[in-house]
Image: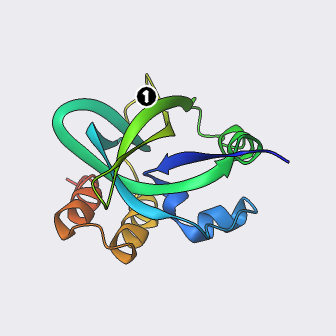
Amino acid sequence: MSKDILCFFYGSFMNREVMAKANHVLDRWEVATLPGFDLRIAPHANLIPSAGRMAFGLLTPMTHAKLDRLYGSQSRGEEYLPESVLVLRGDNSYRAATTYLVSDMEPGTPDQDYLEMIAKPAQEYGFPDWYVEKIRSFIQPHS
């Protein structure tokens, strides 16, 4: 039996439908923030170190095997690698967690469906309105 580790999801893996397609039920989770990081979506979600900023996401227990399946199955060309972080929970306590980041994402414009795949659950989980709007703001208007 593999031991659970805490993982911080901030992108499309917060979406229950996305997780279901990966044969995982997101059943135990809590909303948390990651201080010192800012969300970027260009073309996919990533966190960038940024003093004074914070990213919202879900803190959830996962096994290493499940994480390997989730991140090993991505075919977008980016390599998301595990990073140890300190996540701020709703009770103002910090917990060590693992999140996955891309060190050199090739810039691109996200599509509307992808942004909604992140914005919709963010709204459902009760992230602040300004943060949900920030997610949706990454779409570029057509010129």
Q: Which one is nearer the viewer's eye here, 108 or 131?
A: 131
Is residue 133 positioned above or below 85 on the image? below
Residue 74 horizontal/vertical position (percent): 65, 42
The residue positioned farthest toward the right in the image shown: 1
Corner quadrant of residue 139: bottom left
The residue that label 1 is drawn on is 106
Q: Please name the amino acid that badge 1 sits on.
A: Glu
Instruction: State the SS at label 1.
Output: loop
Residue 124 horizontal/vertical position (percent): 39, 77
What colouring method underlies this structural image? rainbow
Residue 42 horizontal/vertical position (percent): 36, 41
**Residue at screen point 21% across, 64% down:** 133
**Residue at screen point 31% across, 73% down:** 126
Q: Which one is nearer the viewer's eye here, 36 or 92?
A: 92
Residue 112 horizontal/vertical position (percent): 38, 62
Corner quadrant of residue 73: top right
Is residue 50 positioned above or below 7 on the image? above
Label 1 environment density (alpha carbons within 10 Å; few <14, some 14–19, many ≥20)? few
Is residue 74 positioned above or below 112 on the image? above
In this picture, residue 82 sits left or right of residue 39: right
- The mark total stands at 1
**Residue at screen point 31% across, 60% down:** 91
**Residue at screen point 52% across, 65% down:** 15
Corner quadrant of residue 87: top left
The residue positioned farthest toward the left in the image shown: 52
The residue positioned farthest toward the top in the image shown: 104
In this picture, residue 61 sits left or right of residue 100: right
